[in-house]
Amino acid sequence: MLHVGCAQWTHAPWNGRFLPQRPKERLRSYATWCNAVEGNTTFYATPSRSTVETWAEQTDPDFRFVVKLPKSITHERRLNGIDEELRAFLAAVEPLGPRNHAVWVQLPGSFTPADVGGLAAFLRRLPRTHRYAVEVRHRAFFEERGARPLERVLSELDVEWVPFDTVTMFQSPPTTDAEREAWTRKPRVPRRSRALTGRPIVRYLGRDDAARTVEGWRFWVDVVAGWLREGRSPTFFVHTPDNAEALDLARRFHAEVAERVPGLPPLPEPEPAEPPALF
């Protein structure tokens, strides 16, 4: 099964167009458009357990959250001295149950291949009640010498390597304000497409021009279709700098893969953003 999604389930340009104006209904409605979402909000603070319970209530058990560890764990303390905070985080997201597809360990750009030993020690201490996925951004990891030790550690522990594909973004200069911001903030690293587990996760950044986004993901349509034929269960997240069309684009990506993989289960039918008017 292929899961697709976006960087968030609420985004101002979607309100009233794709999703309801009422905030409490947006995740439930989002889950009729896509069957996965990145849990980026957890990077900034651990949510309350009651908040996470509402997330679970609004989504089916086969919906996928990929929840990001708080930056205090990954960026500020760099995986050291974080046991109490980690326990609190894992307890907070527990109500997601099977929806918690992976705990996402996004590491800062200053985390280098010299730090892999510390990452290995951290991953080995993690409870096996969750699955985990790691994202690295230092360019040395995308060279063979830097990739090998990290792949060895992740493969040993059944942890996935999450690529953030920004190649399309950097193929030509930015043309919108959102692209100009992305140009300065997003990592510029080579594309990586090797899956280490049966549950690969990909983050893809396109452009604000939908046609260029679609053209840029042709590579991934082939890769994801191949993974599905191998029996893997991938999750693919579509980003654009302004994300205005990301919901619709995620569904379009799923449709393109479905053309290559007959029998791929369909996505849900999207609910209208607002109930139809009586008159």
Image (cartoon, rainbow, N blue to C red):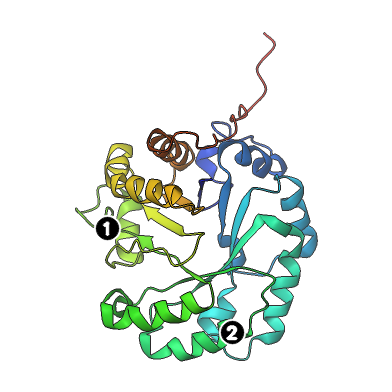
Horizontal side of 208 relative to 71 (left or right) equals left
What kind of element bears circle 2?
helix
What kind of element bears circle 1?
loop
Residue at 62 percent across and 91 percent down: it is: 81
* Depth check, front residue: 63 or 169: 63
Q: Check residue 236 in the rendering and tell me which mark sits there, or answer none.
A: none
Find out whether the residues at labels 1 and 2 contact each other: C-beta distance under 8 Å. Answer: no
Where is residue 132, by image quadrant? bottom right
In primary-sequence order, the first of circles 1 and 2 is 2
Q: How many marks?
A: 2
User: How far across and down, in percent of the image, does residue 116 sit?
Assistant: 43, 86
Residue at 57 percent across and 81 percent down: it is: 123
Horizontal side of 153 relative to 18 (left or right) equals left
The residue positioned farthest toward the front in the image shown = 230
- Give me the C-alpha separation between circle 1 and circle 2: 32 Å
Task: Report crowding for label 1: few under 14, some 14 to 19, many 20 or more residues within 10 A (C-alpha).
Answer: some
The residue pinned by badge 1 equals 167
User: How far across and down, in percent of the image, does residue 9 sit?
Assistant: 58, 47
Amino acid on which disc 1 is placed: Val
Residue at 32 percent across and 59 percent down: it is: 166
Task: Report crowding for label 2: few under 14, some 14 to 19, many 20 or more residues within 10 A (C-alpha).
Answer: few
Where is residue 86, by image quadrant? bottom right
Between tags 1 and 2, which lies in front?
2
Horizontal side of 53 relative to 213 (left or right) equals right
The residue pinned by badge 2 equals 124
User: How far across and down, in percent of the image, does residue 146 sit?
Assistant: 31, 82
